[in-house]
Every structure is written in structure tokens, then in C-alpha cells.
Image (spheres, helix red, strand yellow):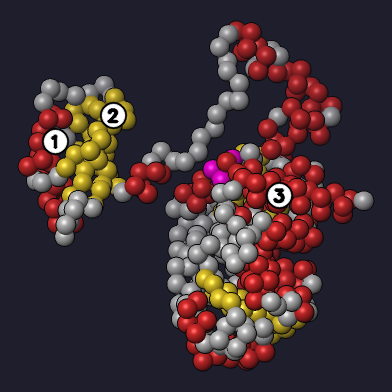
Amino acid sequence: MNGKNIIRNLMLEIPSAPGNLGKVTTAIGLAGGDIGEIETIKVGPHYTMRNITVQVEHEEQLTEILEVIRNLKEGIHLHTVSDDVLSAHEGGKIHMKSKMPIRSLADLRRVYTPGVANVCEIIKEEPQKAKIYTGIGNTVAIVTDGTAILGLGDIGPVAGMPVMEGKAALFDQLAGISGIPILLDTKNPDEIVQTVKNIAPGFNGILLEDIGSPHCFEIEERLKEQLNIPVMHDDQHGTAVVTLAAAISAAKSAGVDLKQAHVGQIGLGAAGVAICRMFMAYGVKRVIGTDKSMEAMARLENYGGHAAENIEELMESCDIIIATTGVPGLINKKWVRSGQVILALSNPKPEIEPEEALQAGAAYAADGRSVNNVLGFPGIFRGALHAGAESITHPMLVAAAEAIASCTKQGDLVPDPLNPDVHAIVAEAVERAALSSKK
């Protein structure tokens, strides 16, 4: 293997004595490692924590270097070995920061005691002014029980924290919203609902994240009924918004009238059912779904959709196919009809590769690599908060999807998720829809 193409960051605790750092770097060099940056991250009373970047040509060489370091004496301790992704998460991706400097006693008196007492009295008399004089009005709780983290499943709330921090970072960068991760050490719907109700006074919105099916449906519905602030389960409605936007763009490229089409949804988990409801809210003529769970099929019919007995039946009768099963290769190439639009959205492997679907006669085919929820939730909540909305409705979500589609270039499925203009346009559309419903 040519070239030094493996880079790792070694976090080392090195006792503060002359020569100890030299012993580490010499050991790495003698084992064939090429040292890049050496970063001091903490200086303790008797030791120094450092990140040392090392490049090697192959895994065996890295293994040798790690073994040599672990065998060093003098109290030198290897804490972690990480790549660039892990290094980006060291110390977390978010932190709470003051919006104003506190450099003098006058500053202290204004932001804390005694001045703050006046603000407390105002809010006591007029509680709604908390949204003006505190951060509550611009703060959203990102709540998870850790039961459906990405494609990893039930790995627990703490293991899901990197996802919640990511959501918070995106809220801040793309919509200027303070997102606060809330990790719940319970899977009991009653306990989750009660806990969120108890903490709700400190927030102006609730984003439910990575909560598994079917209890996610009950939790969201109960919170929407019992709270007077926007509540949205991103795995349901955020996914559905971006999927509808993608379908609008795909149908346009294929010359298909989406509202007159028959849309088939393969997989009726949290995302699948929400996608069906979103398409129906948009005005699609007929929405058909299929799932191995009879309970999921009944849930779809309860919302006004139609159930198909199997995938073959659905493929035969539908013009547009959406798949969110997580099962690679589930759709057989021979089931594809000429002129169909197929969006196989499971990551990292779709239900059918776009190339195969196109070869079989599909008019348009895509996978889910570009269909990212980040196109939805920041602008949706920004618009809802600006409008002072007490809930997030299907008209608001449809408006978000149409706004995303309006920003998509011809031939693309969705726009650039990091384009700030897209999120501003989504927020404006959602705010208009929210204000329209108040009239």
C-alpha cells in the first residue's frame, strides 16, 4: 500500500517530567509513525494531556505503535485513539455561552442581582413576557429516550447524545435557535409525557428525536394535546416533509402530476406512516402502503390511507414508490413498471439501486443519500416560533415541503442542506401558514 493514508489522533496523559514527551515521540518514530500536530489540551498539577496526530501506512503499523506506547513506563497513559470524526466530537459539539460580557460590577448588577429581581417581578405579573426577557422564546428541547438512534436501534439515550448535539448545532447554525438536548432514562410513554410536561415551561418548542415505533405515536399525540407549544417528532414529520419535497421535484422531472398519482409507501414505521399522511395532506389522490405489521397497516387505514397485501401488489398499482424499510435490495428489479418514479430512501443501502430501477424502465429513481431531515426541522421551528404558533400543523409542514421543492434546481432531488437561504425560505413559508390558520 503506497502513501501514508491512515491518520489517527492519540490522546495521551504524560507525567510532567523532562523527557517524557520525547520518549513518546521517539517511540512513535522508531515504530514508523509520522507525527503531525501535537496539541496540549489540559495541563494538570502532575501531568499534561496531549493530542498527537500520527500517520501510518497500514493498520498493522498502527497496532505496533499503540503497543509500544502502552509498554512505556513513567506513568504514560494512552486514553483514546480516534479518527477525524471522533476527534470532531471530543468535548461535545455544543456549549452554553453568555450573550453579553460581564466585566464589571455594573454588568453584574444588571444581569444578576439586584437588577434581575425587577425582571422576575415583571414576569410574575405577566408570564407571557418570559418570551421577551428570557431565552425561553427561542429555545427548543431535543428529547430522546434512545430507542431508535439513527439506524442503530435501541442503544440508549446517552449513546444517542452525539445525535442530539448535532441537532442542537444545526438549530443554532441554520436557524439561530437554542436547542437543548434532553436525555430520558425511561421508555415508558407515561413517564416520558409527564417528564416533558414538567420541563416544558423552560422551552418554546419540543423536538422529539429517535423515539421508536409504536410508542412514538402515542407520545407525540399526547404532548400535542397537553402542551400549548409546538411539538414535532422529527423521525415522523421531518422525514415526511423532506420526502414530500423530494417527490415534488422527482415528479416534476418525470413529468408526473403528483396530486393525481397513486403513491405507494413500502414500510409503515414512524417515518412511513407520517409520509403517507403528508402526501394525503398535500392532496395526493390515492396513497397505498404495505408493511409486515398488521398493526401498522391498520394505523395507515385509520388515517385514511389504503393497505396493499404485499410489495408486488403495491408496485403494480402505483405511479410513485417510496421505500423506507432499511432492507437493502428489497425491491425486485422485475417489479418496476415503465414510467414509475422510485425513491428508495433507506441508508446506507437502498431497497433498489437507482441504476437498476432506471434500467428496468423507471422514469426517475433516487436513493436517500441527499434526503436529509436537516432541510426541514430548523426552518419549521424558526417559522413556528416567529409566528407564536401553539402547534405544528399539516398545512405548516406542507408549506415547508413546497418551500424546499421551490429551492431545488431542475434535475436535483433536494437543495443544498447547508444553504442558509433555503432555511430562511422554509421559515417564511411556515410562518405564513401558521399565521394564516390564526385568521
- Residues in magenta? 168-172
> Does residue 169 show up magenta in the picture?
yes
Q: Which residue is denoted by mark 1 in the rendering?
A: 24
For the image shown, how many numbered marks are present on the structure?
3
Q: Give the residue type that dot 1 points to.
A: Val
User: Residue at the spot x=58%, y=18% of the render?
Assistant: 101
| View extreme (right): residue | 439
Identify which residue, 363 or 334, lies in the foreground: 363
Q: How far apart in space, not on screen, are marks 1 and 3 (Cα)?
A: 53 Å
Q: Give the residue type that dot 3 points to.
A: Ile
Q: Is residue 150 left or right of residue 53?
A: right
Q: Is residue 37 left or right of residue 356?
A: left
Q: Quadrant of residue 99?
A: top right
In percent of width and height, residue 216 lies at 63, 63
Q: How far apart in space, not on screen, are marks 1 and 2 (Cα)?
A: 14 Å
Asked which secondary structure carries label 2, the reply is strand
Q: Which residue is denoted by mark 2 in the rendering?
A: 40
**Residue 97 versus residue 344 in the image, above or below:** above
Asked which secondary structure carries label 1, the reply is helix
**Labels 1 and 2 touching (C-beta < 8 A):** no
Q: How far apart in space, not on screen, are marks 2 and 3 (Cα)?
A: 43 Å
Q: Residues within 10 Å of mark 3 (few under 14, many from 20)?
A: some
Asked which secondary structure carries label 3, the reply is helix
**Residue 239 versus residue 287 in the image, above or below:** above
**Labels 1 and 3 touching (C-beta < 8 A):** no
| View extreme (top): residue | 105
Choose the circle earlier in sequence order: 2 or 3: 2
Q: Which mark is residue 425?
A: 3
* Of the two numbered discs 1 and 3 in the rendering, the one whose residue sits closer to the viewer: 3
The reply to whether residue 398 is in sight is yes
User: Residue at the spot x=16%, y=42% of the render?
Assistant: 34
Q: Is residue 357 left or right of residue 124?
A: left
